Image (cartoon, grey):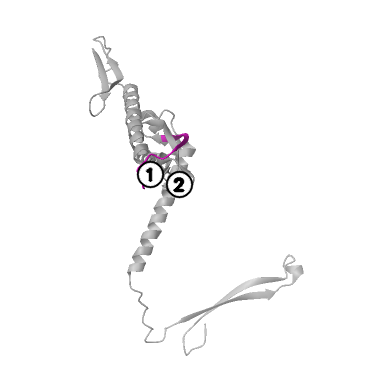
């Protein structure tokens, strides 16, 4: 048996073979049938490369024109971005453009721009970041890296230090979001001051602190030491 797996463009004008699967009837009891993990990883990685390449081309084309006149911005050079996904590490090529159009208008701030870099501020796909943080929260960083390398076509499995850094960034983002949510909550609540007590307290705790001169020969050369004193008193009665 031989199966060809191909992909084509939306209009069907171009077709590309991404895998050839061959099988025969000679199968041992320990082999099993169907696709192997390595075959699936290779298949998904090739498909991811095709999809991302087409998507990157559309992003670059949609963000390479002047907003004033609609003409393409002048090309300065080519650039590449390393982008990590759950289905492989990709080297994405994108043009670098001058921000000033031939008509004189400035499309963006600065002298040049990379349309893809503006969209992909984070160079790791959000799903891969989630998987790293999820598994690292359930096991050690080293085991999480091995697990992801076993089941995903990452090319090179992320090292434990890389996963640790991703988890730290995810935690910092969660803390920042929690603070923002808390600020919005308290800003939306009316400020209410408690009513003053209507009766005198049953007891009062007085606390004071200060420094006492020390005898240097008996205190290891120290000239003074700090003390904290307190007393519990009941209004109208001697302190105790």
Q: Quadrant of the N terminus?
A: top left
- Give the extent of the magenta segment: 65-83
Q: For residue 143, say whether it is visible.
A: no
Drawn side of residue 34 relative to residue 187, left or right: left
Q: Residue furthest bottom?
A: 236
* Residue 15 on image: x %, y %: 27, 22
Residue 66 image label: 1
* Residue 178 on image: x %, y %: 38, 57
SS type, badge 2: helix
| Magenta stretch holds residue 67 | yes
Residue 229 image label: none
Q: For residue 73, say whether it is visible.
A: yes
Q: Callout 2: 10 Å neighbours few (<14), some, many (20+)?
A: few
Q: Which residue in the protein does label 2 denote? A: 168
Mark nearer the N terminus (1 vs 2): 1
Q: Residue furthest top?
A: 26
Q: Callout 1: 10 Å neighbours few (<14), some, many (20+)?
A: many
Q: CA distance from mark 1 to mark 2?
A: 39 Å
Q: Nearer the viewer, residue 121 or 219?
A: 121
Q: Quadrant of residue 82?
A: top left
Q: Quadrant of residue 19?
A: top left
Task: Give the residue at x 46% y 87%.
Answer: 235
* Residue 231 on image: x %, y %: 53, 79
Q: As displayed, is residue 37 above or below residue 73?
A: above
Task: Give the residue at x 35% y 37%.
Answer: 61
| Magenta stretch holds residue 80 | yes
């Amino acid at each position: 048996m031989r199966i060809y797996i191909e992909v084509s463009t939306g209009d069907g004008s171009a077709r590309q073979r991404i895998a050839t699967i061959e099988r025969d009837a000679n199968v041992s009891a320990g082999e099993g049938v169907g696709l192997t993990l390595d075959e699936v990883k290779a298949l998904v990685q090739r498909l991811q490369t095709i999809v991302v390449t087409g998507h990157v081309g559309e992003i670059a084309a949609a963000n390479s024109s002047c907003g004033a006149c609609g003409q393409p911005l002048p090309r300065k050079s080519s650039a590449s971005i390393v982008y990590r996904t759950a289905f492989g590490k990709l080297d994405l090529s994108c043009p670098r453009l001058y921000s000033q159009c031939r008509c004189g208008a400035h499309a963006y701030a600065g002298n040049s721009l990379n349309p893809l870099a503006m969209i992909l501020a984070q160079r790791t796909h959000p799903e891969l970041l989630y998987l790293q943080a999820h598994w690292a929260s359930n096991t050690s960083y080293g085991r999480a890296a091995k697990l992801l390398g076993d089941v995903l076509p990452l090319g090179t499995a992320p090292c434990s230090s890389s996963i640790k850094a991703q988890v730290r960034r995810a935690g910092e983002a969660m803390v920042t979001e929690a603070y923002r949510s808390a600020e919005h909550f308290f800003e939306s609540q009316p400020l209410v001051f408690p009513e003053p007590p209507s009766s005198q307290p049953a007891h009062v705790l007085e606390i004071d602190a200060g420094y006492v001169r020390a005898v240097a020969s008996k205190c290891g050369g120290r000239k003074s030491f700090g003390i904290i004193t307190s007393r519990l008193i009941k209004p109208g009665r001697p302190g105790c």
